[in-house]
Amino acid sequence: MIKIKKFVFNAFMVNTYLLSDETGECILIDAACYGPEEESEIRTFVAGNNLKLVRNLNTHCHIDHILGNSFIAQVYKVNPEYHENSVPVLLGIRHIGTSFGFEINHIPEPKRFLKDNETIRWGDSSLRVFFTPGHAEGSVCFYNEDQGFVITGDVLFKDTIGRTDLPSGDFDQLMNSIKTRLFTLPADTTVYPGHGPETMIGYEMENNPFIR
């Protein structure tokens, strides 16, 4: 059974998720830790629970969601995995980081690129990748059918949706991603977003004011 630990990191309050199972293997989704104190939270949790970190996945590559990629690559020797369409987003990431007060010294090479509908495996567990562009080029979500949850990055939040006013954002594309990928999931699917509290697919279908 997958256990989900949520951390909230950096000035943008990004939800970083650590998923582990009974084998002791674990993965990170959106390693957003920045600075020694936040990095120590990861170290302490992994060591304290006798876990082995084997994969580092990105829902997308906006600056606030990838700040910990270098730390994870250097300390755990695990390079990030993201969709190939995210590559252009990374081209100016150092300049973008500086504009927000973040120092980006190293951008690790991807271990591999994620593919739509592929299955991500670790330990005895798995996630399915959904390609869900609209908030950013290369945005993906991660779905687990057995336990009924989806990790949505900045695609869908409680009572709102991802921004589309940033470079590569597209409102119509985002709506299509939400309606054709996320809203086809069972209503009782738990949504773990990139910021803020959890929600449910059914709740958002009925109550999200941005869905029309």
Image: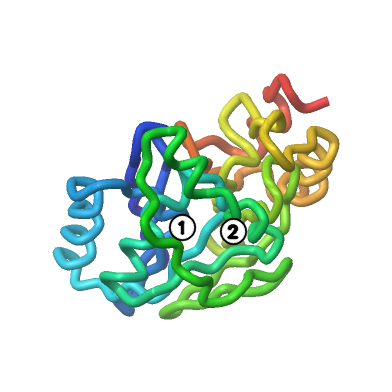
Circles 2, 1 touching at the beta carbon (< 8 Å):
yes
- The circle on residue 142 is 2
- The quadrant of the picture occupied by the N terminus is bottom left
Residue 102 appears in the rendering? yes
Disc 2 from disc 1: Cα separation: 9 Å
Could you tell me how many numbered marks the image carries? 2
Does 165 sit left or right of 179 as displayed?
A: left
Judging from the image, what secondary structure is the residue with disc 1 in?
Answer: strand
Q: Characterize the local packing of mark 2: few (<14), some (14-19) or many (20 or more) Cα atoms within 10 angstroms.
A: many
Q: Would you identify the image quadrant in which residue 124 lies?
A: bottom left
The amino acid sitting under disc 1 is: Ile
Q: Residue at x 19, y 72 (%)?
A: 50
* Residue 67's disc number: none
Looking at the picture, how far across and down is residue 158, in whole percent? 57, 29
Q: Residue at x 62, y 54 (%)?
A: 141
Front residue of 129/162: it is 162
Q: Is residue 41 above or below residue 81?
A: above
| Amino acid found under the numbered disc labelled 2 | Phe
Residue drawn at x 63%, y 37% as measured from the top left: 156
Secondary structure of residue under mark 2: strand
Residue 106 sits in quarter: bottom left
Q: With 158 as the anchor, is 2 left or right in this view? A: left
Left or right, 1 with respect to 205, comes to: left
Q: Residue furthest top?
A: 209
Q: Is residue 190 visible?
A: no
Of 12 and 92, the residue lying toward us: 92
Q: Please provide percent x and percent y for residue 60.
A: 59, 52
Mark before the other along the chain sequence, 2 or 1: 1
Q: Identify the residue shown where x is 77% and y is 27%.
A: 211
Camera-nearest residue between 47 and 191: 47
**Residue bearing the label numbered 1:** 29
- Residue 101 against residue 108 in the figure, above or below: above
